[in-house]
Image (spheres, grey):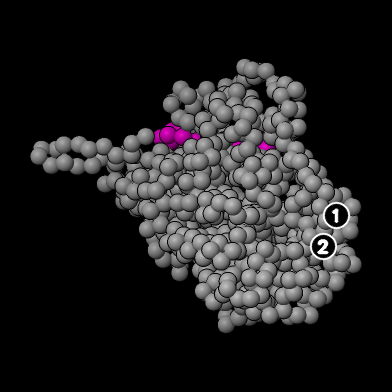
Amino acid sequence: MSRIKIGIFGKKQFVMHKKPELLLPAGNTESFFAALQAGADAVYLGLTQFNARARASNFNQFQFISILKEAKKRKVLVYVTLNTVIKNSEIGSLIEYLYFLNEAGADGIIVQDWGVYFIANTYFPKLKIHASTQMGIHNSVGTKDLADKGFQRTVLARELTLKELKTVVKKSPVETEVFVHGALCYSFSGMCLFSSYTGGRGANRGMCAQPCRREYEDKNLKKYLFNLKDNQLIEFIPKLTEIGISSLKIEGRMKSGEYTYRVGNAYRMAIDDETKIPLAQQFLEMDFGRQKTNYFFGGDVKMAVSDETSTGILLGKVEKVLGNKILISSSQPIESGFRLRILSKSGADPVYIIVKNPLKEGDFYLINKENQFIETQSRVFLTKLQDRKFQNKLEIVSSLPFKFVSSDFKKMILNNLIEKQNTEKEKLFFRIASMDWMNYINFNELDGLFLAFSKPDWTRFNPESTIIQNNRDKVFIELPKFIAENTIGFYIDLITKMADHGIRNFVISHLSQKLMIPENCRIITSENIYAFNDAAVKCIKSEEIENFIYPFEIDFETLESMSFKNGIVPLYFFPELFYSRMPVQLENSEEFAGDDTKTRYKRYRKNGVTVIVPDRAVSILQHKNRLSKIGFSNYLIDVSYDSISKNRLKTLKTRFLKSEQIQPTTTFNFTKGLK
């Protein structure tokens, strides 16, 4: 598809850039019709399973058929979010789900899990596959790999700068999509374990509890360290069009129809006529979101963190409580139909009020509080105008226009996902992230050593040293999760240098990084490439990858259910709860406390990325014998964020051999389960 065409005006030649698609969210029926009214070229939505907005209303199968019919009348495309990781026990339901979308005629599916990709690509070739932003595509190696795998489009990482975006899009063989408006996650999407760690509500399972919106204690001060403002790139629409972005995406499946319409209408206006961008910006002043940032695209992230977590427009405060009425000071008019959110200083649950017949007295408004308890000095936010109504009913569909998937077809797929495995002797791998650990490593006590070094450490690493050359079959060079476009050359040179010195074992942290590895090398995938189900394992093994590390947030139930048990089980590690390009401002310290003030966390900065880890390791060493009994034999001890000590390595090895607990540690999701 050509992105540009050449036109002639008088004697001058000019370039007309193809308009990008406007992609709007549809979290409920009203939002769907609001998106149509706003001029959407496409909408994205979730059904009742497997999507990253589990708390949105979403749609059932009959509603989806109705939505497709309505959208096709308007020549609007419908993409379905399948952007969560899938438990092995859910694969049967996933097959039924993909069959339904294939037969119904969805215009595309947005996926995160490599198992979902593998089943869709192998057995449902009519489905067009888009890579979710949770797949972490952030450079041209990533887009090249997607093209090789048959993806139609990628949603690029939100953390790219304008310069990076321009280069990646120019080199991309697949369509590119970017988020231009809405909420931002502090961590790279798909790489956040904080919610999962604090309560088993996995962000990668669509259950995020939003830990980035909480206060943390830094030097006895309560602060919002990770609370990002909302993204807004409307002023950059001409530049995004010029670059050749295929689709501009608005975040907001949890938002109202009014939000979808107001924001969608503003971006429609800006896409169609850039001279109307100032007017569109005025529309967005009433989008009821948070404060705004241009994030990395704008080149300045210093002001991207906010002390205000609430969405909506701050109107003023409750000055007095007069019986069943409250007196609100407001710099803006308050009218009947306004929906207000009232937040007390004490942190009590918010109170919601629909304004009816307010009495105006200067800059004060007297409003009925509807018999609810409200404290003085509470802040008042406008969250909805209720100035526009949207259709909230779909055409009733009582039966599907096709048969259900046959049990034989489903059984065939399930059988084909079972990967053959061998009975192996027990193997132990270690991971280190600092050159300083090398003084304490005894290669005779391990089967493999993963070197997850920073760029400065790699420049100091000597592959010709005697100890490395004598043990080069046990040394694995590990690549980071994020490789910026301008550092691809550094890592290719590193890989080439290592291979030239006979070190031909690599751990990749993004499936696309396989393209950077020479032939005849051993490759293991890190825990960042989610092997959460048999289909994902099948996908990884189909890439001629030797082995993989199971995800850090996996639970015992999921591990036990998987047919392939030759993967590497992490037994001891410090999970990277946030993995972000954003800096964190702390008061002369690298530690801070959680909102309960009991749990403490540490901050690290590595290769330009901020990493947040808990101060206690996760350990399931005491469950090693239990795992061995059901067929597991490969294990990982990761001391990347541990104190450097010979005694620590000795203690960990001893506890591993005896399958004993080590304290102080936690078991993360292993025993309590992942929702």
Q: Which amino acid does label 1 sit on?
A: Leu
Residue at the left extreme, as displayed: 11
Count numbered badges in the picture. Answer: 2
Q: Is residue 493 toward the left or the right of residue 121 in the image?
A: left
Q: In which quarter of the image is residue 658?
A: bottom right
Q: Residue at x 63, y 46 (%)?
A: 544
Which residue was labeled with disc 2?
A: 620
Q: Which residue lies at the image location 51% right of the left edge and 74% below the top edge? A: 459
Closer to the eye: label 2 or 1? 1
Q: What residue type is labelled 2?
A: Ile
Real-space CA distance between mark 2 and mark 1, rounded to the nearest whole angstrom: 10 Å
Q: Is mark 2 on a helix, strand or loop?
A: loop
Q: Is residue 548 left or right of residue 652?
A: left
Q: Where is residue 638 in the image (x, y as percent from the top left)?
A: 71, 67
Magenta stretch in the rendered image: 36-49
Residue at figure coordinates x 76%, y 28% from the top left: 411
Say which quadrant the N terminus sits in.
Answer: top left
| Quadrant housing residue 603 | bottom right
Label 1 Cα neighbours within 10 Å, binned few <14 / some 14-19 / many ≥20? many
Which label sits on residue 25?
A: none
Q: Does the magenta stretch include residue 587?
A: no
- Is 489 situated above or below 333? below
| Residue positioned 63% across, 76% down in the render | 466
Which residue is denoted by mark 1 in the rendering?
627
| Viewer-side residue, 246 vs 459 | 459
**Does the residue at mark 2 contact the one at mark 1 (Cβ under 8 Å)?**
yes
Residue 306 drawn at (x, y percent): 52, 65
Q: Is residue 39 magenta?
A: yes
Q: Can residue 340 be seen in the rendering of this structure?
A: no
The location of residue 417, given as percent across then percent down, is 72, 36
Could one spot residue 452 in this view of the protein?
A: yes
